Image (cartoon, rainbow, N blue to C red):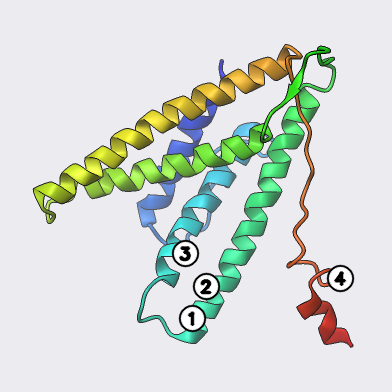
C-alpha cells in the first residue's frame, strides 16, 4: 500500500471526529493502537484541527486582551506539539529505511517526508472547510463559484502532494534519495536560548 492511501483516510477521520463536537477542548479519543504510525498520524491531524480553530478564535476583533494572550500561549504550545510529531514521523522513516544504502547518484530532497506529510494533513483540513463554505446556502452565486474553484484547486493539490510523497518514499526505499533531518532549531521556547527568558534570571 502506498503511504498516501494509508494516511489520507486517517487524516480525514481525525478531521471528521474533531468536528463531531467542533470544540477546541474536546478530549481526543484516538481509535488507533498506541505506538502505531496510524496513531501518530491521527494525533498529528487532530492537533492541526484544534489549532485551525484556535487561529480562527484569536482573530475575533472583539476578543479581549487576556483571552487573546491565553490563545496565543495555546497556539505556541500546539506548534511545539506539531513539530515534535513531525520529528516522530521522520524517526519512523529513518528506522524504516536504515538499512538502505543510497546510490552514488542519490540526491537530497528539499524537505523530509514528515514535513511533506505535515502539509498533507493541513490540506485535508483546508478541503474540509472549503467544502463547508462551498455548500453554504447564505452566499451569493459569485461567492459560491469562488469557493468551488478554490476547492477544486485544493483537491488537485492534494492529489499532487500525495503522489509526490509516495514517489519520495519509493525513491528513498530504492536508494535514489536519502533522508537527512536537522531536528528542531527553535530558540524561543528554550529558556537558555531566548534572551527575553534567560534575561529574567539576571
Identify the residue under disc 3. 54
Q: Is residue 73 above or below residue 169?
A: below
Residue 3 visible? The answer is no
Q: Quadrant of residue 41?
A: top right
What is the residue that sits farthest to the right in this orientation? 202
Q: Quadrant of the N terminus?
A: top right
Left of 168 or right of it: where is 138?
left
Dot 4 falls on a residue whose secondary structure is: loop
Mark 1 vs 2: CB contact within 8 A = yes
Mark 4 or 2, nearer chain start: 2
Residue 169 in the image: x percent, y percent?
A: 65, 21
Dot 1 falls on a residue whose secondary structure is: helix
Left of 136 or right of it: where is 81?
right
Identify the residue under disc 4. 192
Left of 30 or right of it: where is 152?
left
| Mark pair 4, 3: CA separation | 28 Å
Q: Residues within 10 Å of mark 3 (few under 14, many from 20)?
A: some
Mark 3 or 2, nearer chain start: 3
Dot 3 falls on a residue whose secondary structure is: helix
Q: Quadrant of residue 57?
A: bottom left
User: What residue do we see at 52% from left, 72% from top?
Assistant: 71
Residue 62 in the image: x percent, y percent?
A: 35, 81
Mark 3 or 1, nearer chain start: 3
Mark 4 or 1, nearer chain start: 1
| Mark pair 3, 1: CA separation | 11 Å
Viewer-side label of 4, 2: 4
Mark 4 vs 1: CB contact within 8 A = no
The foreground one among 17 and 70 is 70
Q: Is residue 148 above or below residue 57?
A: above
Amino acid at each position: 500500500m502506498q503511504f498516501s492511501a494509508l494516511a489520507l483516510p486517517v487524516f480525514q477521520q481525525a478531521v471528521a471526529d474533531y468536528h463531531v463536537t467542533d470544540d477546541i477542548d474536546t478530549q481526543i479519543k484516538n481509535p488507533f493502537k498506541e505506538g502505531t504510525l496510524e496513531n501518530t498520524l491521527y494525533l498529528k491531524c487532530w492537533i492541526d484541527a484544534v489549532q485551525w480553530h484556535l487561529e480562527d478564535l484569536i482573530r475575533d476583533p472583539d476578543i479581549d486582551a487576556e483571552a487573546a494572550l491565553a490563545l496565543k500561549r495555546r497556539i505556541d504550545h500546539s506548534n511545539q506539539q506539531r513539530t515534535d510529531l513531525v520529528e516522530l514521523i521522520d524517526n519512523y522513516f529513518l528506522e524504516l529505511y536504515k538499512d538502505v544504502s543510497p546510490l552514488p547518484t542519490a540526491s537530497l530532497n528539499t524537505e523530509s517526508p514528515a514535513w511533506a506529510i505535515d502539509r498533507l494533513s493541513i490540506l485535508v483540513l483546508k478541503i474540509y472547510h472549503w467544502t463547508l463554505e462551498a455548500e453554504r446556502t447564505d452566499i451569493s452565486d459569485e461567492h459560491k463559484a469562488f469557493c468551488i474553484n478554490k476547492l477544486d484547486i485544493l483537491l488537485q493539490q492534494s492529489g499532487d502532494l500525495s503522489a509526490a510523497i509516495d514517489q519520495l518514499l519509493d525513491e528513498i526505499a530504492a536508494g535514489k534519495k536519502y533522508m537527512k533531518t536537522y531536528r528542531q532549531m527553535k530558540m524561543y521556547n528554550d529558556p537558555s536560548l531566548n534572551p527575553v527568558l534567560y534575561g529574567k534570571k539576571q
